[in-house]
Amino acid sequence: MEEGDVVITQDLIESFRSPRGGWTNKILRELGVQWPPKHGWKKEIEGKVLPKANVERLEALTGHKINGEPSDSVVGNCKLALISMEQATRYLRTAIAAAEKEG
């Protein structure tokens, strides 16, 4: 394995799903999968090494880094989840305080 190469994992494969839940022909081609993908293609490529050139093309296609910092969309989703958790915590604290006053 050379610098910049990446080992294909299930998480990596899943990160390339389109908004409609599938994978595009271009993404699959960069992962080394022929179109149309055959049953079991994910297990077949898991653990294989993805060369740096393919990594760079995938990064260009998807707009996010495979090695390094998470994409802006991942960071944004994490921030939204944190805000939702903070709001839920405030709501629960208020509800508990109100219940304690009543009871």
Image (cartoon, grey):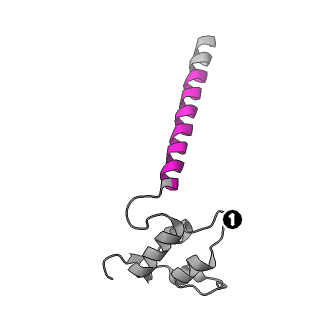
Residue 91 visible at all:
yes
Identify the image quadrant of the C terminus.
top right
Residue located at (66% from left, 66% from top):
21
Amino acid found under the numbered disc labelled 1:
Arg
Q: Name the magenta segment's main secondary structure.
A: helix
| Corner quadrant of residue 69 | bottom left
Front-most of residues 103 and 28: 28
Q: Position of residue 6 (x, y in %)?
A: 40, 76
Tag 1 residue: 20
Check the image and name the residue furthest to the front. Answer: 60
62, above or below 29, in the image: above
Where does the magenta region start and end? 73-96
Q: Residue 32 in magenta?
A: no
64 or 80: nearer the eye? Answer: 64
- The quadrant of the rendering that contains the N terminus is bottom left
**Where is residue 43 drawn, in percent x and y?**
55, 80
